[in-house]
Image (tube, grey):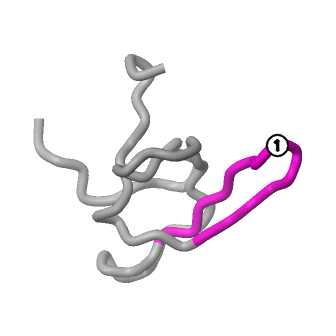
Amino acid sequence: MAAKSNFNIGEIVQLKSGGPEMTVQVVPEKPTGLYKCQWFAGKKLEAGLFPFDSLKLVTQEAK
């Protein structure tokens, strides 16, 4: 299977280095742009911008 070249809004991703599962909220117009992701830290909704190369798709098998 070829490596994924982008993520779609609503997909669940995680930093390759670990951390919480995050939902892709905004997809960049340029492939080299930053993805805006959101996640819950306890009850608080957090958000951040991450480059594609730092993220991996969370698959159902991984859960």
Relative horizontal placement of residue 3, taking residue 49 as reference (left or right): left
Q: x, y (%) of residue 27?
A: 50, 68
Q: Main secondary structure of the magenta part?
A: strand
Q: Is residue 1 magenta?
A: no
Circle 1: element type = loop
Q: x, y (%) of residue 15?
A: 43, 52
Q: To which quarter of the image does residue 57 belong?
A: top left
Relative horizontal placement of residue 26, taking residue 40 as reference (left or right): left
Q: Please identify the quadrant where the N terminus is shown.
A: top left
- Name, please, the residue furthest toward the left: 1
- The residue indicated by pointer 1 is 42
Q: Residue at x 76, y 48 (%)?
A: 41
36 in relation to 19, above or below: below
Q: How many residues crowd mark 1 within 10 Å: few (<14), some (14–19), many (20+)?
A: few
Labels in figure, total: 1
16 in relation to 61, above or below: below
Q: x, y (%) of residue 60?
A: 44, 21
Q: Residue at x 56, y 56 (%)?
A: 24
Q: To which quarter of the image does residue 25 belong?
A: bottom right
Query: Which segment did they paint magenta?
Result: 35-48
Type of residue at label 1?
Answer: Gly
Q: Residue at x 52, y 42 (%)?
A: 12
Q: x, y (%) of residue 9?
A: 55, 55
25 in relation to 18, above or below: below
